[in-house]
Structures are given as C-alpha cells and as structure tokens.
Image (cartoon, coloured by chain):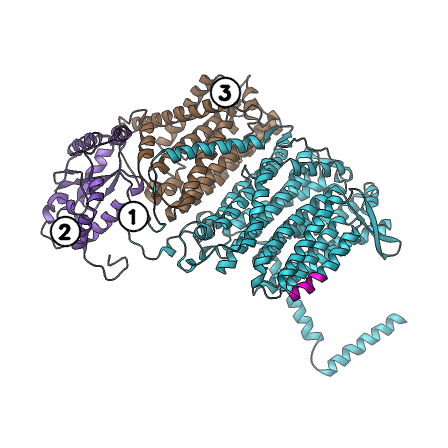
Amino acid sequence: MSQLLLILFIGSFLVYLLTRMNWIIGVLANIGLAIYSFYRLFTFKVGTSESIFSLIVNQNGTLVYSELSKFFGIISLIVAISVYFFLINWLEKQKNRAVFNFFLALITASTLGVFFSGDLLTLYIFWEIMLLFSVLLVQMGKEDSKKAALNYLTISLIGSYMYLYAVFMLWNRYGTLVIKDIVQKISVETSIFKWAVLILIAAAGIAKSGIFPLHTWLRTTQGSSPDAFSAILAGQLEKLGAYMLVLTVAVFPSLKMFPVLYGGIPVFNYVLIVLGMISILIGTLMAIKQNDMKMLIAYSTVSNSGYILIGLATMDKIGFAGGLFHAFNHAIASVMIFLSFAAVIYRTKTSKIDEMGGLIWKMPLTFITYLVGIISLAGIPPMSGFISKWMIFVVLVKKGMFLTAAAAFIGSVGSFLYVFRPLAGVFLGQLKSKHKDVKEVPIFMLIPMLVLVVITVFFGVIPGPVLNMITAVEKELNIQPLEHTMTVIKSSVGQWNTLTVFTMFAVGFIIAFILYMVFPKAKRIPLTNQYTAGEFLYNYDLYHYSTRFYAFFERLYEKHPSVEKLYEMFGKFFKDIGEFLNRWFYSASPSAYLLWFSIVLLAIFWVRW
Amino acid sequence: MTIFKVAAVLLTGFFVGLTLEGIARKIIARVQRRYGPPWYQNFIDVFKALSKHGFSHGWIFDFGVLMALGGVIATLSFVPLGNLVAFPGLDNVFVVLYLFAVGALGMAMGMVGSGNPNASIGVARALTQMLGYEVPYLVSLAAIIFYYKTSSISNLMNLQADSWNLFKMPIGAAVAFISLMGMLGKKPFDTPIAPAEIASGPMVELSSKYMGLLMLMHTFSIFVEISLFVDIFLGGGSYLVFLLKFTVVWIIATLISAVLPRFRIEQVVKFYWRVPLGLAFLQAFFVLIGWVF
Amino acid sequence: MSYERTIWEKIADNLRSRSMWMLHYCTGCGAVELPPSMTSRFDMERLGMGPMATPRQADIFLITGYLSVKTLRRVIYTYEQMPDPKYVVGFGSCTINGGIYYDSYATINRVDYYIPVDLYIAGCMPRPEAIFEAFTELMRMIRKGEAIGWKKYKENYEWYKQNQLKSLGEVYVHDEFHE
C-alpha cells in the first residue's frame, strides 16, 4: 500500500510535468494512475498492514487494508476515473491545467491514504493534504470562489482541528494512536472522555459530509468551484466524511461504549441521528428554493448525507448496509448529475436554472445522464438509489423510529420536488433563443457519463456485487451481515426482488409501447405550437415556467431561521474584534511600536525571572 | 402461472377501474340531480381518445407517456387483489409506493416536455401535493409495519384475519383515507389539474392517444391506490370480496369529493402536515405503547 | 356526401359520436345557454359530452356568437390546434349571417368561409332544446360519416387560407395588441 501511495504521490508530480508539456497526455497519465490504483485495490490482501515513516517517538505510522478501505477506495476511484475521462475535453477551457491536474491527482492519492490509514495521525496527515489541495482547487472556479474556498477551509478546519484535539487526547491517555489498539481500550473509559473523543472525531466527518450544523460550506463551495471539481467534491471528498462517520459509529464500537436506548441504538448514535434528521429537512427544504442548479444539488447532498448518517448510526445490519450502499449510490448519482451540469455549463456558460430551458433537444445524452442520476438520487425503483433508501426506511420502521422515518419520508418525497426543478427548468420546456446553436458535448465527456448510467442501472437491477462488498465490511466490523442474494434483498420485515421489479417495469413499458404503436400515429409539431388560450406569442423564451418553480410551497417557509446567517454574524463579530485590535496594536507610529516592543520585552524578562 | 396472474391483475385493473370511474361519474351526476352518463362511458372515452390523430411534442413527450403507463402497469402487477397475488412475498409496501413514483415522474416529464407552462405549474402543484399526502400516509403505514413486523402487502392483508386494521387502528385508517383522497386527486385535492385555473394542468397539451394512454394510466393509478388502502386496512378475503370492498371505498371517496370545493395548493400542504400528520404520529405512538384494539 | 370508411373507422366514428368533448369559444352571448344545457335540467353528460379545457383534448368546437376580425384569427389558430377528427358547431344566427351586427365593419358574417362548419344552430340565441336537437343530429352525422368538415378543410386548405388572408389582411406590427 505504501508503494501504491508512493507511486501516486510521485506520479502526481509527473502528471504535473506532463500536463505542462501537453495537457492531454497529462490527463491520460492521470487516468492511467487512477486505473492502476483501481486494479491494485483488488490485488491487495485484506487485513495486511504496513508500517511507514514515524513522525512521533514510539509511534510508527501504519497502513491497514480492510474491507472498509476497499469499499470506499472503489467508490472514490470510480468517481475519479469518470471525472478524469470527462476532463479530456473539459479541461480545454480551464486556465491552469497543469495545476488542476496535479491537485486532482494529489487529492486522489491522499483520499486513498485516508482510507488506508491504520492510525489516527496518518489519517490526519492525509486528510490535511486532501483538504489543502481541495481548497486550492475550489478557488479556481468562478469569481466568488475565493470567498467560497475560505468558507470551505474554515468549516473544514473546524472539523479537522476538533479531530486533532481528539487525537491529542487519545495520545495523552494511551500513548498510542493505532486505531485497533485504541478501540480495544476505549470502551472501559469514563463516559465524558468517550463522548468527547467520539464527538470530536465525528466533527471531522460531519464537516466533510455536510451534516448540520457544519453544512453551510456546501452551497457556496459546490456552487462556485470548477464544474468538474464539483463532481469530485460530491462523489469523492464528501465520501471521506462518510468514511469518518463509519469510523466513529462502527470502528469505534459505539454499541459497547455507550448505553443502548430505544430500538437498540446507542445514545451517542441518537445524537448523530438527530443531526441527520435536521440535515435531511434542511437540505430538502433549501434545495427546493435554489435557483442555481449546482447549489440545488449541493443542498441535496446535505440531505443525502443525512440519510447516510442515519443509516450508519442505526448500527443494524440492514441500516448500516443501507448507509454504506447509499454512500455508493450517492457518489455515483451526484457525479452523474454534476457531470451533466458541467456539460450544460460547458455549452451554455450559466448555471442559473431560469436562464436555460429546452436543452433536451440539443443535448439528449446529457439529459439521459441527468435523468438516470436523479432517478437514482431521488430513490425511484429501477435504479440503485432506491435500494439503499429502502434499506434505510425498513430499518427505521422496524425499530419504530417514527419521527426519523417521517424526516426520511419528507426528504425522499421532497427530493422528487427538487430534482425535478433542473429537469423542467434546464432540459425540458422551451428552448431559449440564445441557445439555438448549442451542441451536444464532445465524445469524451459523454463516455464517462454514459458509463455511469450503465453502472447505476446495472446495480439497480443486480445489486449483488455491491451488497457482497458491504456484507464483507459488516462482517469485519462485527455487525451481523445483511442477508441477500444477487437480486433479492431480505430483511426481517420482508424482502423484494430487484430483478422482478425491473422485469415488470420492462413488461409495463412494452405493453404501453404496443398500445402506442397500434393506435394512429401522431403528428410531430414544434414546441412553439402551444395551447395559449388563442393568444399569439412571439417570445417563447418567456413561455417557460422555471423561475421560482415551487413559489407557492416556498412561501410556507419564507421566514426560516438560517444557520448560515448565524455563522456570518460570528464571522462579523470576529472581524470587528480583529479590526479593533488592529487599530490599537498595529498603529503606524514608531513610538507605539516601541511601546509594545518594550512591554513584550519586559514581559519576557518577568517570565524569565 | 405468474404470467396469468399478472394478466388477471392487469385486466381487473382495466375493466373494474374503468367501470368504476364510469359509476363514479354517474354517482356525482345523481348527487347533482342529473341523469349522468352510462356506466361504460369511460371505455368509450378512452377508445375514442386513442382513435384520434393527435399531436406529439417530440420524443420526450412520447417517452414520458410510455414511462408513465409502464411504471403504473408495473406497480399494479405487484398489488395483491384479495387472494389473487401475483408476487407473494415480493410485494413490499415501499417498493410499490416508490415504483408508483416512476409513473408519476414519467408523466411529469412528458407533460413538462410539451413546453407548456400550464403543464409545468400543474406538475409543480402535483409534486407539492405529493409531499403533502405521502408523509402522513407513510407514517401511518410505518406504524402498521412496525406492529405486524412485515412490510409485504399480502402478509399484512392476511394478518388481519381476526380484525381489520380499520378497527384496530382507526386513526391510522382515517389518516390513510384522507391521504388517499389526495392521491386520487379528487376534490378537495384536485389542485394539480384545476381545469378552470391552469387549463387542466399537466394534461394541457394532451391530444388523442396520449390522452387515452394517460387516462388508462390514471385508471390504473386509482386502482393501485385504492387497492393498497383496501389491502392494508380492510383485511383480506377472496377476489370478489376484495372487489366489493374496493367498490365501497371508491364510492365513499366519490361521494365525499362530490360535495367539496377545491383547496389552494399551499392549503393542501398545510392541511396535510397539520392534521393528518399529527394524527399519524398519534397513531404511531398508540402502536408503540400497545394501544391497538 | 360521405367518404368510404374502413370498418375500424366506422367503429371509431361510433365511439366518437358518443363521447364528444367540447371546446367553447365564447365570444358572444351564445354561451349563456350552455350552462343550462350542461347542468341538472338538461344534463349534457348523459350523451357523453362535457366541457374540456384546451383545444388539444376537444372534439367539437362551439363558436357561440359573432366573430370579429380580431377573434377570427384566434378561432382559426385554435381550430388548427385541435386533433383530427374535429367538428365545428356554429351557434346562433351570428355565425350564419352576422346576426344583428351584420353591417359592422369588424364582423365576420359567414364563418363557413374561414373554417368548415359542420352544423349550424339557428336562433338568437338557441334554447337548450335546440342545442340538444343539434347535438343529436351531430351525433347522427358523425356515426354516418357525414361530419367531414375536417377533411374538407384539409382538401380545400388553399381556398380557406385565401379567404382567411383576404379578411384578416396583413399584420404589420407583431405584438399582442395588433394581431
């Protein structure tokens, strides 16, 4: 593993140089690296561990290859490979190609590093590498992306410093940072210590996957980062958050560490479930309001991270599997959606829903990608997204957690609402006259999108392979494995067969198609031939309903409290303090400097003696 | 064997569904002191619509209609009708309810694909209304699944042999019935297709066979929705008993809708999230503490 | 006057005659007689008829009253949006000869010149009894394959278009006020 990571880190410098020479070769090298590491993931033996360099005394950095790292590694590499393929055409319009590519390669390398880490410090180092380069990538986007990057950095740092504090606490207590050793010792500790450590560790995951209250960075960051990078952010980086949450609830055995409450769920996990519920509600309701399509999906990420968290935190065999599978599905679906958005923005140069319309006639394949993506994201049967949502619903209902279940149902039905907005506003409806000459995106942008479509449909019909990986993870983490076959998913409250559902859908479609063919053929008329109550229209741009699509529903929660505003208030407070101090301590006159200098000197002497 | 069962379910949906829609028109007519159309009027309407030469707004319009009908046919085949169960054990409640959404999504997509803003408004309203009624409905179903420890519809149906859920969990049944009214899109919850406001909403650009196929889809959806209610709340029984219960529920829903005006869309959501959702939680609480008759 | 029909078309015509969905173009005063024909007293629905919201869904097009030059444009537009087969019913004397407004500069005196009318209902205004008489007649015509205005419109499209253009004239300013 250390060898793979070394290859990746050195390779990324190579990618940089190659991209400087010829950017297409650079992108291809990047794809090559990713595919190579994807292949290597299957060659490693699960359970092997290696020692690497040591940073602190008596503490070797360790890398461990587990089923969990394999599962998350596969997700992140599928995402990475498809986005890199997309770059072959997309990168042409980007300015700093070499740096872009270099950072992407480093992010993939450090992401794998996080998944491989066997101790908390190594994990932290890779985590910070990933954070640093992702911040640098975010600010390469639109004009306001600098501010967004700062926002992202601040909130991520809150998470990672809290994590670091937990690391210090553990080091102080045990003198070791190897996860395996800590896990064995921690369950006998005082409850305050356990709570503190786990909450601090979970904070990193919460910040990264965009769970309430640290979800505010997602809107601006996703909204203004480079379009292809948004896909990486949603598919690869936010799954690091999911990994961290798995670490907190399952690798640290929350079942043994905390008293078990209603439904057999540890009390610590209840806190997480409540956060997950709030995230689902916030994500859903805010996504419905957005006008920028990338921000809309960013909020949907908040909501889906809530699902992942709830699924994982139930610690039940179905729920945990549902959480993991939802991480997989959400990664694939959000990459599909962000790539199709990137394709749209590549052609139309805008991400505002109400500035577009009717693009389906110009970009049909992009539309299909988006369609399959949203069907999976919203959890509608023939795609894989439904399977994981079903598992989460089942576990919530089985345990009788009705409030959480209601939040999950709102999020699920609400997702129909918000995913439909870009569908209706961007792809369907009247084509704007300024987009008359828009073409479908080039072939290399289409290939990864369509491959992802195939993956989503395939795992929706035959989820067996992914479920096998998930059960392996569950076995490793001492959770009872999910019962399933290739196409049948079983739970204690009933089962269903994905293949039957798909077959019946196909049969239904064929019946409908036969009826459609038997009866007289319809005449194809242009979209401008509309029922207008007899009125003649000349500007069909205006005959497209996309601005404030759900205005009547938005009105119900117009005056909602906003965490974002609260944080802005904090930010302003600190800024004011800073300005105050600035005025007092950094005045321009030399005499003031002399004064402070002498005070400091005196203080030092006083301390010395 | 499964094939014949599926065919039987679909044919039942077609014949019974269309007949009962005709009967509902007759009932509404009688409530309004009219004579009303013959009971087979809806058969005539569907086939007349199918026989016309209409207009298409491009492939997404066609595809949306096909997906709508296909999705609903798929959903219908999973619904148990009394002792006629096509897929015993595999007829999971959530699967049926979410497979149902495929049809809704297909219809929404095709209709918005027609490019008429009336259709978009109608679809936006329909989805919002869905957000309204699905949540209380799913919570009341969740209480039942929690109580019986199974989410298979046919099992739920058979487990009510001693007493119907309507009597065991009357609040939940009431919630489900109110949600059912919203699902059926009957007054007072017919905001999405309000003909006088938004020119029948999603259906604004539908001509000829598209209209016919969507009418079939509508019939099948009504059949699925009421069948779910009957299966889950009104116990099991033979095929004919099921159809009898079905007719009774359908007639009650029709009678209620015949005398009510229409809600505005935000009133729909507010209503559903206030009264039925609260009642659904109450029912869930009763189930948790074991107050089931 | 009737065309050769296949057996399927005969069946379809039979169905069409028993399920007529109306679109009413309520320009004039004729529309006041429609509500009584639809509601309890006369109950149009027993014949399978009912009002529809848009021309796409409708089978018969009721022109209830006189047309002006401005509204004729809308009528033609709407008529062309209806799916085949479609039937036009002219309500009252205004559609036949202009009625009491026959000598106005803006009145269209004969709708027949611009779109094919299958059936006229005389009267100013026709009472619901007359309307029902007309609808049963229209049903008979459809069943027998005699209501073929939509075919005539297709065959004589040039002629109709010429008449329409002659009456409407050229439109110079394209916005909603001048059409």
**At numbered mark 1, what does the secondary structure look like: helix, strand or loop?**
loop
Left/right placement of residue A607 relative to residue C154 reads right
Can the viewer see residue A574 in this picture? no
Can the viewer see residue C137 in this picture? yes
Q: Three-letter amino acid code at disc 3?
A: Leu
Q: Which mark is residue C107?
A: 2
Q: Position of residue B69 (x, y in %)?
A: 44, 34
Mark 3 Cα shell of 10 Å, populated few (<14), some (14-19), many (≥20)? some
In the image, is residue B132 part of the stretch drawn in magenta? no
- Establish if A143 lies above or below C94: below
The residue that mark 3 highlights is: B84
Q: Are marks 3 and 2 in contact (CB under 8 Å)?
A: no
Left/right placement of residue B121 relative to residue B79 reads left
Do the dots labelled 1 and 2 sit on one chain?
no
Query: Disc 3 is attached to a residue of which chain?
Result: B
Q: What's drawn in magenta, residue-wise?
A: A13-21
Q: CA distance from mark 1 to mark 2?
A: 21 Å
The residue that mark 1 highlights is: A533
Q: Three-letter amino acid code at disc 2?
A: Thr
Q: Which mark is residue C82?
A: none
- Establish if A418 lies above or below B43: below
**At numbered mark 2, what does the secondary structure look like: helix, strand or loop?**
strand
Q: Colour of chain C?
A: purple
Chain letter for the brown part: B
Chain letter for the cyan part: A
Tell which of A272 and B150 is nearer to you. B150
Quadrant of the drawing holding the C terminus of chain A: bottom right
Q: Three-letter amino acid code at disc 1?
A: Ala
Query: Disc 1 is attached to a residue of which chain?
Result: A
Q: Main secondary structure of the magenta part?
A: helix
